[in-house]
Image (tube, helix red, strand yellow):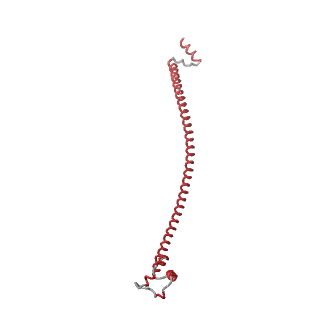
Amino acid sequence: MLSVQEALDFDLDAMTSGFGFTPWAADTCPTLEQLMASSASPSPSSSLDDNAAAAEEENGEVEEEEERRRQRRKMSNRLSARRSRARKQQRLEELRGESARLRAENRELAARLHAVARHGLAARCQNARLRAEAAALARRLLALQRLARGRHMMITASPPPPPPTAPGAAAVLASLMA
């Protein structure tokens, strides 16, 4: 399609000088305004232009659709990233809570361990004291047993006392000896 400047520069005399095909007779020659108006109306050459324009328009629509898709994808990615950050933040808060709970539990267990260790130490000390006391009592018992055996031996080594006699028996015995 001719631009306005090309149409103005177009040499109509060359076309009508007999060198080539003249599409119209001299008396039916259209004016520039008519030519411009006819180029605005559909013609076979403009149908090619229309096809090109339609292709450009279609390309424009495709590009617009791609741009919309790109924008939707960007928005979707932003929302996804926002949700991901929120999940990460929530997980971080959960882990901080868990950490605080475990620290408190650790302090409680350490206190209980310390109490059990003190109780164990007290039990070992009492055990040692009771063993020392039991050893002292065992030595004392052994000494007393030795003393009792010694007395028993002294008692068994001396002559036995005479058997007790009845009062009437002494007189009978004296008479027999006389």
Q: Position of residue 154 (x, y in %)?
A: 51, 19
Q: Position of residue 102 (x, y in %)?
A: 55, 47
Which of the 4 quarters of the picture holds residue 161? Answer: top right
| Location of the C terminus (image quadrant) | top right
The residue furthest left is: 19
Image position of 136 with respect to 91: above or below: above
Q: Residue at x 54, y 19 (%)?
A: 163
Q: Position of residue 94 (x, y in %)?
A: 56, 52
Image position of 74 with respect to 101: above or below: below
Q: Residue at x 47, y 87 (%)?
A: 26
Q: How many numbered markers are drawn?
A: 0
> Observer-nearest residue: 50 or 96?
50
> Observer-nearest residue: 76 or 141?
76
The residue furthest right is: 167
> Observer-nearest residue: 104 or 95?
95
Which of the 4 quarters of the picture holds residue 127? Answer: top right
Q: Residue at x 55, y 44 (%)?
A: 106
Q: Position of residue 35 (x, y in %)?
A: 50, 82
Q: Does 93 sit left or right of 1 as displayed? A: right
